[in-house]
Image: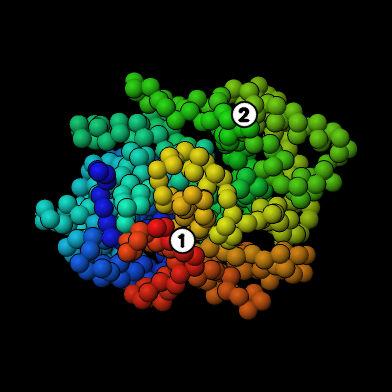
Amino acid sequence: MSNFPAYDEVHVISDIHMGGAEPSFQVLRETKRLAGYIQWVGTQNPAGQVALVLNGDVFDTLAEKSSDYIMVDRAVEVVSSIMANPSFSGIWAALAAFVALERRSLVFIIGNHDVEISFPVVQRLIQQRLAGDNPQKRARIEFSTIGAGFSCTVGGARVYCTHGNEVDPWNFNRYEDLAKVGRRLNAGRTLTQQEWTPNAGTRMVKEVMNQVKEKYKWIDLLKPETQAAVGTLVVLDPSQAKKIGDLLSIVGRKTVDGAQVNQRLSMDGFQTHAEQNATPPPLTQMLGSNLTQGMRTYASADSQAVDAMLLQAEQNLGTPNAQLHEQDGQLGTGQLIFDRLTGWIRNIPKDEALRRAMKDWLSGDKTFDINDKDDTYKEVTAAVGNGIDFIITGHTHLERAIDMGSGRYYFNCGTWIRLLSFTPEMLKDQASFQPVYKILIDGKMESIDNASFGGQPFVMNQTSAVSIKKTATGAIGSLTHVLGDGTGEPQIIKQFERS
């Protein structure tokens, strides 16, 4: 007999990213639709047990204007302000109405943009906002914040939900360190920012992306988040080159021999993870072939000399404490590469430099192929036991619906934030890219929202959800799109039935 909760229906959404005090800094647009969808889930199967799972990145504290990598003393203040923000308050009103209903359950799973949800003080704040002092309502709220995900059963099928950043070496959470922060807060102590070691993804967002986003609001609407994105950031804002260079030495990726970022920490104090176990990606991969070729063309040395410089920089990055900036009075080879790159950028039209960078970013792109077995699929399915029938992730913002065989299925429930859709025609040449460039360089979210190319809106109107429902013979899983005001039946994109 299973000890996991049993439901008649489970509805899962991910990557809502509520955050940003100013509307221009907010990436969640369909707030009324989301409130309507929460209301719709509450009305399903009135006599049955129904769960709504928020599968990570419910908040986005990284979007808040703060230099802190993690909110500690200000965690309650920041989360309170997000819940009270007029842009998001309707969502929280809908969640409060949901937990007021009998036989409903609301599950919060931790992501990498809302690590503060692991703190007991933040969990109590959320419970108070949604349920007040009502013990029945509070009992309908559950938190999964230790990296264990959430397991349940539907129609005899085992369902497992996890955000997915657990297999992402850029963005993994150090759960033991988060537990230590919670213990300190409960004990009336604090944590200095110097004690906290952020992952590479958090540093990239706080130190680079948020500054670029001040001018180019759309930058974090681009998917996928490949390493070639570095080239695009440098083209948009060459002043970020040195910061990005400094970050490269901590960027880990899983190598062919299976080496992994060390996620297990000592019980004593807060410690930097073992970065020597992580191999950084090649600089050529980060910059992309188009930008690398442009740099070769610009370089005063011949291409062989530039290739040798690239190789030397990559070898330097593979050593402990490698740096890309000036050391001991000498300019590092990595910084020389960025200097040559930014020099080339200054000598060609910026629209052409951006077009080439984005062609690298989106090369071989399978972003919106729901059948693509991306890295998150491969890593999560390899880690999950055969007893799980439905695996549901988020994190990448890219919806997926894949038959794994043997009556097992994988879903990624996508995101609710804006996504930009580029076509090969838009990036074909400088002339075709010119109207796109004008919108991008304008930088305003309103311009992005109103833009269309080839009769197709630039911003995808794609708010995704996954549902697992009990049937007479088993369970059926569906990837869906929530439409309109969210109160109607979602559109089924792909469906799997398990008997």
Where residue 135 sits in the image (x, y, percent)? Answer: 11, 53
Give, as a three-letter code, the residue at label 2. Asp
Mark 2 or mark 1, which has the lower sequence index? 2
| Quarter holding residue 356 | bottom right
Amino acid residing under circle 1: Phe
Q: Quadrant of residue 144?
A: top left
Mark 2 — residue? Answer: 257
**Residue 365 x/y as whole percent:** 65, 56
How would you rate the neighbour count of disc 1 (Cα within 10 Å): few for under 14, some for 14-19, many for 20 or more?
some
Q: Say which residue label 1 marks.
A: 496
CB under 8 Å between callouts 2 and 1? Answer: no
Observer-nearest residue: 48 or 407? 407
In the image, residue 4 above or below residue 264: below
In the displayed structure image, the side of residue 276 where residue 436 appears, left or right: right
Dot in front, 2 or 1: 1
Residue sitting at 72 percent across and 40 percent down?
Answer: 284
SS at mark 1? strand
